[in-house]
């Protein structure tokens, strides 16, 4: 069990899953997603829905195709708090893009972070994310 997972690039850019909240049966109800860069921070609390495809499926799909794929892989939170997309670049790196969206009725903003990650890191990230969501 882990209470946070940090996916980082160059140690200055990071996507973090953290702050899980559970009901009395031990089922995760909420968690937070934060993106950081030098002089930048954006975070959102996400309500987990039972019918939502979990984020670790997105990472498992990338991990299965770690040698490369065509096009864009996309995952969205059911209620729109955040989304992720990934593309395989000719350099052999994966560009993971995380978007966090405003959640209030009187503001409209979006924060985006692009993380270059090496395909060899996918096994580790996939396992950590799976453990974060599976208690």
Image (tube, rainbow, N blue to C red):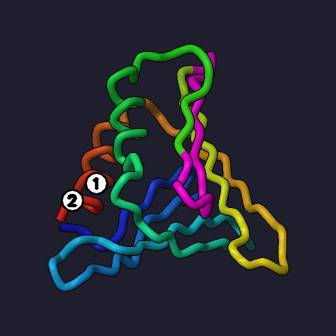
Q: Quadrant of the C terminus?
A: bottom left
Determine crowd level at label 2: few under 14, some 14-19, many 20+ residues with C-alpha closer than 10 A.
Answer: few
Residue 22 sits above or below residue 119 on the image:
below
Whether residues under marks 1 and 2 lie with C-beta atoms below 8 angstroms apart, the answer is no
Is 38 situated left or right of 20 in this image? right
Residue 121 sits above or below residue 64 on the image:
below
Query: Magenta region: which residues?
Result: 76-91
- Location of mark 1 (residue): 128
Of callouts 1 and 2, the N-terminal one:
1
Residue positioned most to the bottom? 24
Task: Indicate the quadrant where residue 36 lies.
Answer: bottom right
Q: Kindly identify the residue that appears in the image at 18 percent across and 76 percent down.
A: 26
Is 68 situated left or right of 123 in this image? right
Residue 49 is situated, as x and y percent measured from the top left of the image, at 40, 62
Label 2 element class: loop
Q: Kindly identify the residue that appears in the image at 42 percent across and 39 percent down.
A: 58
> Magenta segment: does it hold 47?
no
Residue 122 is situated, as x and y percent measured from the top left of the image, at 36, 37
Q: Kindly identify the residue that appears in the image at 21 percent across and 59 percent down.
A: 134
Relative depth, front residue between 120 and 31: 31
**Numbered badge on residue 134:** 2
Residue 17 is situated, as x and y percent measured from the top left of the image, at 43, 65
Residue 24 is situated, as x and y percent measured from the top left of the image, at 18, 85
- From where the camera sits, is residue 4 visible? yes
Residue 115 sits above or below residue 112 on the image:
above
Task: Tell me the distance, in whole angstroms, between the alpha carbons under discs 1 and 2.
Answer: 10 Å
Relative depth, front residue between 86 and 106: 106
Determine crowd level at label 1: few under 14, some 14-19, many 20+ residues with C-alpha closer than 10 A.
Answer: many
- From where the camera sits, is residue 12 visible? no
Relative depth, front residue between 106 and 70: 106
């Amino acid at each position: 069990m882990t209470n946070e997972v940090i996916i980082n690039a160059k140690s200055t850019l990071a996507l973090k899953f953290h702050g899980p909240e559970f009901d009395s049966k031990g089922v995760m109800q909420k968690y937070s997603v934060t993106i950081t860069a030098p002089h930048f921070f954006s975070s959102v609390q996400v309500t987990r829905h039972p019918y939502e495809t979990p984020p670790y499926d997105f990472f498992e799909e990338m991990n299965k195709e770690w040698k490369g794929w065509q096009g864009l892989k996309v995952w969205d939170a059911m209620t729109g708090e955040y989304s992720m997309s990934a593309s395989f670049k000719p350099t052999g790196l994966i560009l993971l893009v995380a978007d966090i969206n405003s959640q209030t009725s009187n503001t409209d903003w979006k924060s985006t972070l692009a993380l270059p990650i090496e395909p060899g890191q996918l096994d580790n990230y996939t396992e950590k994310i799976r453990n974060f969501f599976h208690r």
